């Protein structure tokens, strides 16, 4: 009986933490100033929030049914694999399209060096640099 009360507390904590992270990620996406800042909301905080909710659901049904649910494990695994990859691709696309960024954003990524800015920001590997 005490184990079930403890597990209910863990599940409740994961659900509340997941909801808080998802809400903070959504607020970040709505209120941050440029594309690069907005990219952090859904890719970091919201992914962690949805991950917490999926783990809580998986734990709940494991306690109720007595066996782990493979589908929720796979969803969680694919979520944590694909979210960073899609965020990286979105950021690279933003750099290649030379999207505006806030002056407060620091850094000088190699894609924006002066010798590479032209019609194509990054030279094609098969054609060389010239």
Image (tube, rainbow, N blue to C red):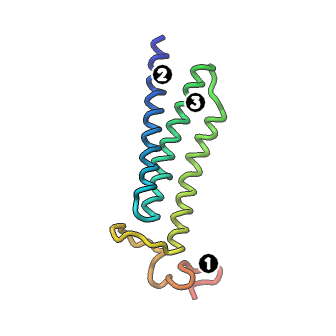
Q: Position of residue 112 (x, y in %)?
A: 46, 77
- Dot 1 or dot 3: first in sequence order is 3
Q: Which mark is residue 125?
A: 1
Q: SS for tag 3?
A: helix
Label 2 – label 3 distance at C-alpha: 12 Å
Q: Determine the residue positioned at 47% across, 85% down.
A: 115
Residue under label 2, please give it. 8
Viewer-side residue, 51 vs 28: 28
In this rendering, position of residue 6 left or right of residue 87: left
Instruction: Give the mark nearer the N terminus: 1 vs 2.
Output: 2
* Image location (x, y in percent) of residue 11: 48, 27
Q: Which residue is mark 3?
A: 58
Q: CA distance from mark 1 to mark 2?
A: 55 Å
Position of residue 62 measured from the top left corner of the image (x, y, whole percent) = 59, 24
Asked which secondary structure carries label 2, the reply is helix
Extreme-front residue of the structure: 30
């Amino acid at each position: 009986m005490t184990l079930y009360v403890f597990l209910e507390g863990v599940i409740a904590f994961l659900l509340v933490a997941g909801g808080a992270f998802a809400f903070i990620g959504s607020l970040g996406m709505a209120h941050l100033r440029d594309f690069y800042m907005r990219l952090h909301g859904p890719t970091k905080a919201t992914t962690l929030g949805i991950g917490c909710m999926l783990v809580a659901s998986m734990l709940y049904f494991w306690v109720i049914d007595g066996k782990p649910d493979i589908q929720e494990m796979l969803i969680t695994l694919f979520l944590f694999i694909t979210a960073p990859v899609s965020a990286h691709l979105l950021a690279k696309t933003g750099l290649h399209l030379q999207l505006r960024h806030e002056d407060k954003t620091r850094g000088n990524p190699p894609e924006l060096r002066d010798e590479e800015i032209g019609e194509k920001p990054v030279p094609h590997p098969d054609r060389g640099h010239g």
